[in-house]
Image: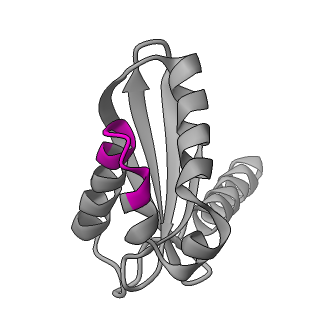
């Protein structure tokens, strides 16, 4: 009887954890397109093309963040992390109707996490670096 109860509890806990995991992308988004858009933004950051990031972003970024804000944030990252090396991995999920891409990038001194949110037109609506 104890074995049955422990098996049932394990199954219930497993189902609970699966249900709480990240939401996958809906048919509104394509991982390959999001991967490419994220790579472009990281390349633009590394090439100091901050105005291009803002110009190609959605209205949220255009209204709330200037190229100077993005430049200052990325300069702070470069000071603590060193030079960019490569993108290690990317994960994709959907939250509140937006696609969220989390990229882990290798730098000389440490890894840096980039979080980009995109709307359905693949316009950047949020950028976060740490």
Q: Nearer the viewer, residue 28 or 117?
A: 117
Residue pictured at 44% horizontal, 71% vertical: 57
> Is residue 130 visible to us here?
no
Q: Nearer the viewer, residue 130 or 32?
A: 130
Position of residue 18 in the picture relative to residue 39 (left or right): right
Q: Nearer the viewer, residue 12 or 113?
A: 113
- Identify the magenta region: 43-51
User: In the current view of this chain or complex, which residue is farthest to the top?
Assistant: 109
Count of picture labels: 0
- Residue 27, relative to residue 104: is it above or below? below
| Main secondary structure along the magenta-highlighted residues | helix
Q: Percent x, y for residue 2?
A: 77, 48
Residue pictured at 52% horizontal, 77% vertical: 98
Residue pictured at 44% horizontal, 38% vertical: 104
Res 4 quadrant in image: bottom right
Q: Quadrant of the C terminus?
A: top right
Q: Percent x, y for residue 67?
A: 52, 55
Q: Percent x, y for residue 49?
A: 36, 49
């Amino acid at each position: 009887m104890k074995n049955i109860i422990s098996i049932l509890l394990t199954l219930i806990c497993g189902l609970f954890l699966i249900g709480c995991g990240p939401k996958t992308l809906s048919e509104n988004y394509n991982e390959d397109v999001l991967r490419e858009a994220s790579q472009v933004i990281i390349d633009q950051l590394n090439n100091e093309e901050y105005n291009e990031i803002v110009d190609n972003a959605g209205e949220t970024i255009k209204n709330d963040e200037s190229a100077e804000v993005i430049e200052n944030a990325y300069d702070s990252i470069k000071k603590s992390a060193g030079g960019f090396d490569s993108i290690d991995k990317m994960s994709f999920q959907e939250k509140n109707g937006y696609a969220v891409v989390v990229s882990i990038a290798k730098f000389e001194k440490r890894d840096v996490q980039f979080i980009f949110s995109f709307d359905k037109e693949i316009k950047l609506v949020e950028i976060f670096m740490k």
